[in-house]
Amino acid sequence: MSYLDLFLSFFQIGLFSFGGGMAAMPLIQAQVVDRHGWLTMAEFTDLITISEMTPGPIAVNSSTFVGTRIGGTLGAFVATFGCILPSCLIVSLLAWLYFRYQNLSYIQGTLKGLRPAIVALIASAGLSILTLALQGANGINWLGALLFLAAFLVLRKWKTDPIYVMLGCGVLGGILYPLLDKMM
């Protein structure tokens, strides 16, 4: 591992992450797990969980975590800088262009055309993580599936704050998984 590899990997993630943090997950996975092998898929899932729970964008949190793991404090700085540099440059350019040409129909059409691709990226990342979360040692992790369905129902039906849902699932998982292990 070199600091240049770390910078370039997260520069690519920052450069091609359209649609926010959830859309960046497949790109982060491709660089960190598939290409470089810096993390296993299980560690990547934990990384996404931690990045979701901590303040800030997922890609930036992920870059800081991976950078620290791979190259210490300097690695965290290099990876984080690589992740945010493209956004700073692109947003500055786009803001100037948008304010200058915002009334053109081509600009509005381009923005509308990007929306379905972003939804597909988010759905792909979500399904990958859901599949991993529901895989148990002997098939399907039924307790995980039950927690997922309960969380989904609570979020959709009662519009509960996601932080409370995460805390509730964490508490239930902390209680029920050890009990389930003792029964097995």
Image (tube, helix red, strand yellow):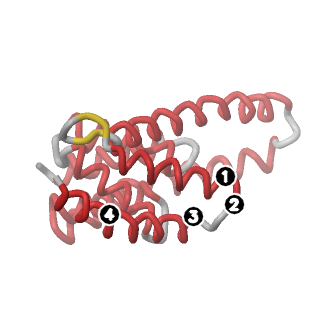
Q: Which of 98/135 is in front?
A: 135
Report helix, strand or loop for mark 3.
helix
Please tell me the numbered disc located at residue 162.
3
Q: Circles 3 and 1: CB distance less than 8 Å?
A: no
Residue placed most toward the observer, 184 or 59: 184
Choose the circle earlier in sequence order: 4 or 2: 2
Where residue 132 sits, quadrant-wise, is top left
Mark 4 closeness class: few <14, some 14–19, many ≥20 residues within 10 Å = few
Residue found 80% across the figure and 46% down from its top = 100
Residue drawn at the location 39% of the way across and 44% of the way down: 13
Q: Is residue 53 left or right of residue 32?
A: right
> Mark 2 and 1 residues: CB-CB less than 8 Å, in contact?
yes
Q: Position of residue 144 (x, y in %)?
A: 37, 49
- Distance from disc 1 to disc 4, alpha carbons, whole Å, reads 24 Å
Residue bearing the label numbered 2: 159
Point out the tag, 3 or 1, that comes first from the N-terminus. Answer: 1
Q: Nearer the viewer, mark 3 or mark 4?
A: 4
Q: CA distance from mark 3 to mark 4?
A: 20 Å
Percent coordinates x, y for residue 26 in the rendering? 40, 38
Q: Amino acid at mark 3?
A: Pro
Q: Give the mark toward the camera: 3 or 1.
A: 1
Residue at 27%, 60% in the rendered image: 177
- Helix, strand or loop at label 1? It is helix
Q: Amino acid at mark 2?
A: Lys
Query: Which residue is tagged 4?
Result: 176
Q: Are marks 1 and 4 in contact (CB under 8 Å)?
A: no
Name the spot of residue 113 as percent of width and height, x first.
70, 28
Local crowd size for mark 3, using a 10 Å CA cut-off: few (<14), some (14–19), many (≥20): few
Circle 1 sits on which residue?
156
Please identify the residue farthest to the front as the structure is shown: 183
